[in-house]
Amino acid sequence: QVQLVESGGGLVQAGGSLRLSCAASGRTSSPYAMGWFRQAPGKEREFVAVISWSGGRTYYADSVKGRFTISGDNAKNTVYLQMNSLKPEDTGLYYCAARAGTYYVTAPGEYQYWGQGTQVTVSS
């Protein structure tokens, strides 16, 4: 079992930045991929970014490529999502998720563990 707790959300103006954190506990020694997803009201949950816990390989949704950066600190069992040049369409509830196995997976249903989410609101 893996427990995930997100933090760092908030209200920011368009063009601003936020850094989200996801603290993992439990069986973190297993090879996991750690992902970020978001969900806007009335929309489906969508993939944002993912990192392989052991190798640091990353993959991004086209909508955030060049603006968001996912990184991990193995010593702290924490994954970060640095979000720059934020746009109103980035608004949503951001979730951290973990899955056992390959990192190159974007479907929410393929992730076994989820945090409770942290709200990001970008005003225009």
Image (spheres, rainbow, N blue to C red):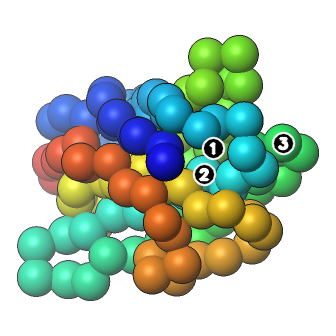
Report which quarter residue 89 is drawn in: bottom left
Q: Which residue is mark 2?
A: 34
Residue found at x 49% / y 48%: 1
- The answer to whether residue 59 is above or below residue 115 is below
Residues marked 1 and 2 touching at CB (< 8 Å): yes
**Vertical order, 36 against 54 (above or below):** below
Residue beneath label 1, please? 70
Q: Secondary structure at mark 1?
A: strand
Question: Which residue is at a point 54% across and 78% down the rendered structure image?
Answer: 110
Density class for disc 3 (Cα within 10 Å; few <14, some 14-19, many ≥20) is: some
SS at badge 2? strand
Residue 66 image position (x, y, % from top left)? 66, 54
Element under disc 3:
loop
Name the side, left or right, on which 34 lies relative to 96.
Answer: right
Furthest toward the left, the residue is 42
Q: Is residue 106 visible?
A: yes
Looking at marks 1 and 3 on the same chain, the residue that comes earlier in the sequence is marked by: 3
User: From the viewer's perspective, is the residue at label 1 or at label 2 nearer?
Assistant: 2
The amino acid type, in three-letter code, at marker 1 is Ile
